[in-house]
Image: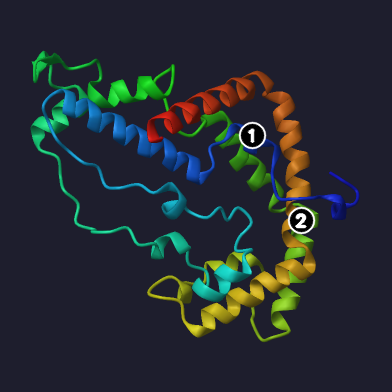
Amino acid sequence: MPADVSSVHGLDLPLDRSLLAPVEELEVIKARNTLMERCLTNHGMTFTFPPVDPARHANKPRRHGLVDAGEAAAYGYRDPAVFATRGPTRAVEPTPDVVSVITGTRHGKVGGRDVPPGGCAGEADRTLAADAKPGQEPVSFGLSRRSHEITRTTPPVTAAAAAWSLCMAEVGFDYDNPDNAINDPAFSAGRPSEHEIAVATQDVRCKERVEWVRTWVAVERAVQDVLISRHGPDLARERGHRDQQLAAAREVNG
């Protein structure tokens, strides 16, 4: 662990390089849906999946809790993506025939063409990834979760949480740590109240004052560096897999 966490710049973590960011995950989903729609068209069928707008619909990463003062003032602890306009919410269900071609349970020719192995879904997956497994990288994702859990109870992080709690108490908000604030049941339903916005805004101010995120990121970077040294070949493979599927998805999405 760095002796001086004030030297940490930015919030990126070493494992980010082999993970799909939330917006990138949606880019892959959007491309997969498009490929399946094209495949169905080739078989004389029409179905449109619900629209996916990665830039608008991606969940904001909150690995270390709420840290954006603008979001706190506008949404409290709520994810802004929840309030994004997504158009009509009525879902149109595919017919059984469409489902059978998507999944590949229908065999033989449909619309004059053979249904591909695994159906249109299988064809889309093979287009996006050589192993036909597009999506989040499992080893990287598991190690990322592990580093987060390992570091949340380390002395530097718990000390920063205690300092944050004192900062919150200065204005009358009684929470032992940031998790207790963001998970307050009072903030779980409906639109954010004035009280929630006040708590969330002070939460971000206190995190900045005690350098909550910078402290946690410094510790977690050190832990991730160790994990990376132990899983080098798997992570190198997943970095290549991530780049390949993302490039393929962006070619489809245009």
Which residue lies at the image location 74% right of the left edge and 61% below the top edge?
Answer: 212
Q: Residues within 10 Å of mark 2 (few under 14, many from 20)?
A: many
Percent of width and height locating residue 75 = 49, 72
Q: Residue at x 71, y 53 (%)?
A: 153
Tag 1, which secondary structure? helix
Q: Is residue 38 left or right of residue 194?
A: left
- What residue is rendered at 26% in x and 30% in y? 36
Q: Residue furthest right?
A: 3
Which quadrant: the C terminus? top left
Q: Amino acid at mark 1?
A: Arg
Q: In this picture, is 13 found above or below 113?
A: below
Check the picture and name the quadrant holding the N terminus.
top right
Q: Is residue 146 visible?
A: yes
From the top left corner, tell me how far across and down residue 194 is, in percent.
51, 84
- Seen from the viewer's position, the closer of residues 232 and 176 is 232
Is any part of residue 181 visible from this angle? no
Q: Secondary structure at mark 2?
A: helix
Query: Quick one: 140 or 123, which is closer to the camera?
Result: 123
Q: Which mark is residue 214?
A: 2
Q: Is residue 45 above or below residue 58?
A: above
Residue lying farthest to the front in this orientation: 254
Residue under the image location 79 percent in, 55 percent down: 155
Q: Whole-percent x and y of residue 253?
A: 39, 35
Q: Which mark is residue 17?
A: 1
Earlier along the polypeptide chain: callout 2 or callout 1?
1
In percent of width and height, residue 206 lies at 72, 72
Q: Image height check: is 110 above or below 63? A: above
Q: Amino acid at mark 2?
A: Arg
Query: For residue 199, which quarter of the picture?
Result: bottom right
The quadrant where residue 90 appears: bottom left
